[in-house]
Amino acid sequence: MTTAVDVAPQRSWRRVLERFSPFGVRRRPADWVSDSVLFALSLAQWWWNGLPIVHPQIPDWFWPIDRTIGLFACVLLWWTRRYPLACALLLLVPGAIAITAGFPTLVGIYRLAKLGKPTTTFLVTGVHIVCAIPYHAVVPIPALPWKVWLIILPLMYALAVCFGLLGRARQQVIAGLQESAARDRERYEERLSVTRQEERERIAREMHDVLAHRISLLSVHAGALEFRAGSSVAPSVDEVRAAATVIRENAHLAVEDLRELLALLRGNEQELGTARPQPRLADIDELARESEAAGQQVDLVVDLDGATVRESVQRTIYRVVQESLTNARKHAPHARVRVQVSGGDGGIRVVVDNQVPVGVTDADLLNGGSGLIGLNERVRLEGGTLESGIEAGRFRVLVGLPGGHR
């Protein structure tokens, strides 16, 4: 049975092993390949330079020491990625006294330049050069003059530092590109979020316009039926049936419109390509007939002189007329409404006006709502203007929109 006293030392040893393990640092596949190749080259150099026939100037008694130190330097390379500075300092002695440790010492300097601080790299490299220069005095390399040694040795270390700094610069460029890509992705997601919010607001305006129109028709017919039922002259069966039919049809259309708008909000019907067509100028006649069927008096004149009107402007004109008719039913149910759409490629003018009850002011008409506010925003997005108010006892909505085809 394992007790808590036994488990504590095990955890302590595990932490020590993890701390000093050469594999504690995360390596990508490319890092594993790079470290393995450098280790293999170091072993090949250690074996070749360890042959007495290659360096006969080294005494026989020193060869075991040289090979041991050189093998230690080769194995130490596996720690250079995790502890570059410590390994570079540990390689000072092998680089100064063991010819079999020459290549792994340069690899250690290269790794320090790539992963460490530049100032520390230059300082440690200078110490390495100073410690390695006396080697030629103690064990002279045949056919290598002192002047050549003093040139070659610093150049080899400088080459290792340059390769390391190049690798460091490459890593910094890649990190900068990744940060830039992350920022671009964040900006894209932010723009996407704003676009989605704007689309939801547009759908909310569509929902207000459509449902307000349908519900106002229901209200008019239900009110008329209620009034007739309470009067001395009871409505006939045909009149009740006709009113009930209109109420049922408009209730059904209101539900369908609500379902469609919710589907658009979820994106389902647009993705499937089954969304109903958006209203256009040609649908204004049907809108006027629906209002007249509800008892509203509408005088409609559309004269665009054959102009080509883009889809979004047609939809805006339709919504302006629809909202104006809805407001007239709510605030002046028995007034005649005049609707005039005129203009051409140079611009389009929409005027909707109706008589208002005596004593009604602009403040009374604007208290309720978001309808005209939504219309104003819709018109503004199309580059147009909207004016509304009471003039000479009539409430007028005047909209100017750019014409032509974009």
Image: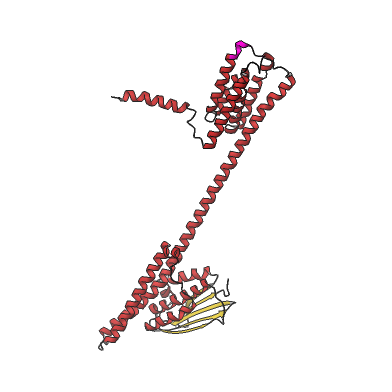
Q: Is residue 236 left or right of residue 117?
A: left
Left or right: residue 250 compared with residue 17: left
Q: Residue at x 48, y 30 (%)?
A: 23
Q: Residue 214: x and y, percent?
A: 37, 75
* Span shown in magenta: 56-63
Instruction: Name the spot of residue 314 as percent of width and height, x first.
Output: 51, 74
Q: Looking at the picture, tell me which residue is in the foreground, 329 or 279.
A: 279
Task: Please tell me whether residue 202 belongs to the stretch shown in magenta.
Answer: no
Return the residue found at the far front: 53
> Which residue appears at 63% of the width and 26% of the height?
125
Q: How many numbered marks have been drawn onto this rendered protein structure?
A: 0
Instruction: Single out the residue that lies furthest toward the bottom.
Output: 233
Q: Can the viewer see residue 76 in this picture?
A: yes
**Residue at position x 37%, y 23% in the image:** 9
From the image, which quarter does the C terminus lie in?
A: bottom right
Does any portion of residue 357 appear in the rendered image?
Answer: no
- Between 72 and 313, the one lying in front of the other is 72
Q: Is residue 372 above or below residue 134?
A: below
Q: Pinpoint residue 25: horizontal percent, then vertical percent.
A: 49, 32
- Left or right placement of residue 145 versus residue 194 in this view: right
Q: Residue furthest top?
A: 61
Vertical relation: 276 (above or below) 111:
below
